[in-house]
Amino acid sequence: MITRETVEKIAKLARLQLSESDLEKYTGQLNNILADVEKLKELNTDAIEATTHAVEVANPLREDEVKTNTVIDAVLEISPDHEAHFFRVPKVL
Amino acid sequence: MTTFETVIGLEVHAQLKTKTKIFCSCSTEFGKPPNTNTCEVCLGLPGVLPVLNRKAVEFAIKAGLATHCSIQRKSVFARKNYFYPDLPKGYQISQYELPICLKGYLDIEFDGQKKRVGLTRIHMEEDAGKLNHDFGSSDVSHVDLNRACTPLIEIVSEPDMRGPKEASAYLRRLRDILVYLDICDGNMEEGSFRCDANVSIRPVGQEKFGTRCELKNMNSFRNVERAIEYEVKRQEALILDGGKVVQETRTWNADKGISESMRSKEEANDYRYFPDPDLLPLIVEDAWVEELRKQQPELPVEKSERFAKDYGIPPYDAEVLTADKAVAQHWEEAVKAAQGTEPKKVSNLYMTHLLKLQKDIPETFERITSSIVAEVLKMTEDGQISLGMAKEILDEVAASGKAVKLIVEEKGMVQVSDTGAIEKVVDQVLADNPKNLADFRGGKDKLFGFFVGQTMKALGGKANPKVVNDILMKKLKG
Amino acid sequence: MELHHLTLSQAAEKLRKKEVSSVELTQNSLKRIESLDPKVGAYLTVTADSALTQAKAIDAKIASGEKLPELSGLPFSLKDIFLTKGIKTTCASKILHNFIPPYTATSAQKLFDQGIVLTGKLNMDEFAMGSSTETSAFQQTKNPWDLSRTPGGSSGGSSAAVAAGLCYGALGTDTGGSIRQPAALTGIVGLKPTYGRVSRFGVIAFASSLDQVGPMTKDVRDCALVLNAIAGYDDRDSTSFKTAVPDYTQSLKKDCKGLKIGVPKEYFIPGTDPEIDAAVRKALETYKELGAEIHEVSLPHTEYAVPTYYILAPAEASSNLARYDGIRYGHRAEGAKDLLDLYVRSRSEGFGAEVKRRIMLGTYVLSAGYYDAYYLKAQKVRTLIRRDFEEAFKKVDVLVTPTSPSHAFKLGEKTDDPIQMYLSDIFTINVNLAGLPGMSLPCGMSAGKLPIGMQLIAGSFQEEKIFHAAYAYEQATQWHQMRAPL
Ligand SMILES: [Mg+2]
Ligand SMILES: [Zn+2]
């Protein structure tokens, strides 16, 4: 059972703010979804390997060659706040 | 009173010297204007995907081989999730459960003792960007992502070190190796070789580890020692006072000489690691490891032992000469080129002169090639010039890059070996100093040096010292 | 036939025979969007000017006798999840309401290289999270067959636009059924290729290990043409697969002699609408007539697919969506008092309810102490689900199932009940978990004049078998010729 406090903690971790009514609603909904998920416990998976990728081959590797890229100018243009080629944020302590 | 034992484990982040970043093709060049070494991938734009740099993997394997690790056939990149403005994707891609290198060791020496320090693991990860706090207005920070996605290896030691000296000996050895492998430039001040220390204390004899603190922000070997010393005292005082050490991260303030608490672990992030679905497992075949093993250079310890043994130079000289790979190579080539000259003499020239010269003139070893060293030493052996002249010539080569012959001609540096000319001068010197001559003949042997000096001075320093000695000896005895 | 009812292939044919110009096709599409889209609500952005410029350029090339790829000059649209350089791309989220990408997705670029004319960007569920396109932050897309109903989701803008004849084809993405379910609900063909068949580079990520790009078209041949254009290895996507791309039009054969069709018994369940069940069974009869062998097979772990998916997809999503932080692009809250406030308010204002719900769920299942019980467990069950398919494909070439358990449902009908909504993907999710190719194609019409879709599933990189079976069925029936009454 997920409590309201847990939901609040998770929201903080995810950098989300939930209204009182959302908190209530999400607590209920998450509990319902996780109750469904309990079904997986029926299966004994001790000896089963986890699938992280549907198609498992070796990761391709890239050669160490520089490619110049200039998207930064377009990105700064659409950025919410920038100054002299920096992105700007409230003071980080 | 309880005596305590210090327990130290180190985590080193070493920036790899690849041309491009670990997951994109941006340049890793240092000192570029903010955000100019970036692309959609390292800016964390929507829809981008990481592609792993082969060179970065090779460098990690090289580091693992040099530290006796076992190279894992399969390793996996995971995501470490947390929010921070220098982390554009909201997660750092880092190897977590399955790193590329496991279980190695490093043999270190400090205060004349030898010790083996275990390595838990070496894993690969991407660096974060940089926050600039002193640009513009004081209520904002500025984000520069040039460094974001630069390849790092994190080298985690076992908690095997028992004091600050051991810790810095370990760090130096580790840095020398990485620099030798040419995979990291080892610059602590610029942050390409960074160290965090986990420090705890426990009563002597106790098995269980004490609560540890993590020390950060120590950007020199000296500061690592100082910070650990301070931390040990702080923890001792705390415990003796009846208090408890709290697990936390502390940052070293070098100006004040103290460490300060950053945040307690309770508030620390829950990183929610999971395998990065955008990258498949990294498979390193044995053949690749073997190929890299063949390419491994001789490391400083091995090289120093070999120099001492093969060339008969003192272990101290060998260690100094091998600390820098380029110097070691330069020296060994000079020894080979200067056949007939004692290696110890070659070593002396480096130890007493060239290494100092290099500090003033960084191009020293480019301008003074090994064959120039050999040439100049040969000239002294042949009595053509004095050792003093040799050093003068080398100084000039280092400063101007001029040819040795030209310098010799310009300065008229030809050593006088003509016995007739020297005899004439010696006769004059003896005539000018009758009292000293009498004293010498009366048994004051020390005055020999005086006569050598006078004779050399009269000859403008260009006389062959051996010839001067022989003539003086003969004439003084009368 | 009217221009807008043509398939891609038919329109291409007319273009080649110079019976029509690209400008005419484009103008016709744009006019149709202008008159009908206010009702359908498929488009978030219409790129009329650049489309006409593109069309003119193609016409000039045709006039000069240049030989062009088959898709050249044909009006085409993209789900608003594909990054298009210089053209706003929102993923139907407020958090990207002002986002102009500086680069183009590989799959979109491949289509541009073929000369398609981009007419616009299509509505979707916010960040592709939904099955009805109702979670879009901007507008409601309606089903062209019945404007009070959903076009499915998350690629509902794409399905609606193709079904309404607003464009000749579209790209969608499919994480748990988001191409196939809307295709079924709007009577068109939608293919989710094998994971790794099409590059994901430049496609806004929802759940990286499940997401796949695919065509949404009026018929099977069109689908093959589009897959030909977009498939293949991309050195910017490490999970794309280095294997040759066949010409899928070569697989379009009319008979099914020797083809072994598997019918997984777990997909024929009481919860499915009886009309759908009956339509798919009837299709199996057709296959028999075409010479196929029908075998019953079992995929015993089918019932675990939905809970497995509802751990894995939100977990990956919670991490993929961390980059929307209001710092470098996208929505930033006004007047944040500090950094934490900036993060929390930008994200809370920018994300809609369904996205937040999934971020919360994903964050929870990955958080300290729960990883093994949820995420790791789900990955292990994923292995069991994969193995079920591997076993089945030892015996048969393709599987036939319903695509969706229900017809297009009424707008608003399931919005308050996430679990009911999640169940609409019950037949499609397994395919993503196993990384397999799956296609939905029309196989019937309900009494209430709503399209019915059936799903064909094949083994890894066996899209050719799907095209073979799909084309043979399609040519033997008329369902693909039905057009929405607009
Ligand atoms: Mg690290
Ligand atoms: Zn980059």
Image (tube, rainbow, N blue to C red):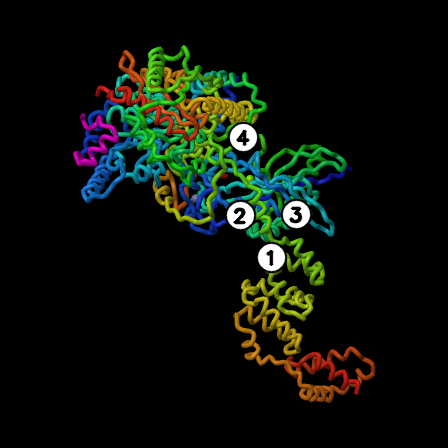
* Subunit bearing disc 1: B
Picture residue at 41% right of the left edge, 25% below the top: C458
- Quadrant holding ligand 2? top left
Depth order, front residue of B90/C156: C156
Type of amino acid at the residue the image marks with label 2: Leu
Are tags 3 and 4 found on a single chain? yes
Are tags 1 and 3 found on a single chain? yes
Picture residue at 26% right of the left edge, 36% below the top: C70
Question: Quarter-wise, where is residue C137 in the image?
Answer: top left
Name the residue carrying label 3.
B170
Depth order, front residue of A51/C313: A51
Q: Position of residue A44 (x, y in %)?
A: 57, 19
Name the residue carrying label 4.
B270
Magenta stretch?
C1-22
CA separation in Å, label 2 and label 3: 19 Å
- Tags 2 and 1 in contact by the CB under 8 Å rule? no
Element type where label 2 sits in the image: loop
Q: Which mark is residue B16?
A: 2
Vertical arrangement, residue B322 with respect to residue B436, above or below? above
CA separation in Å, label 1 and label 3: 18 Å
Q: Position of residue C90 (x, y in %)?
A: 34, 32
Question: Counting residues from the N terminus, which is met first, the one under dot 2 or under dot 3?
Answer: 2
Q: Position of residue C1 (x, y in %)?
A: 18, 25
**Side of C108 relative to C365 (left or right):** left
Element type where label 3 sits in the image: helix
Picture residue at 54% right of the left edge, 73% below the top: B403
Name the residue carrying label 1.
B325
CA separation in Å, label 3 and label 4: 31 Å
Element type where label 4 sits in the image: loop
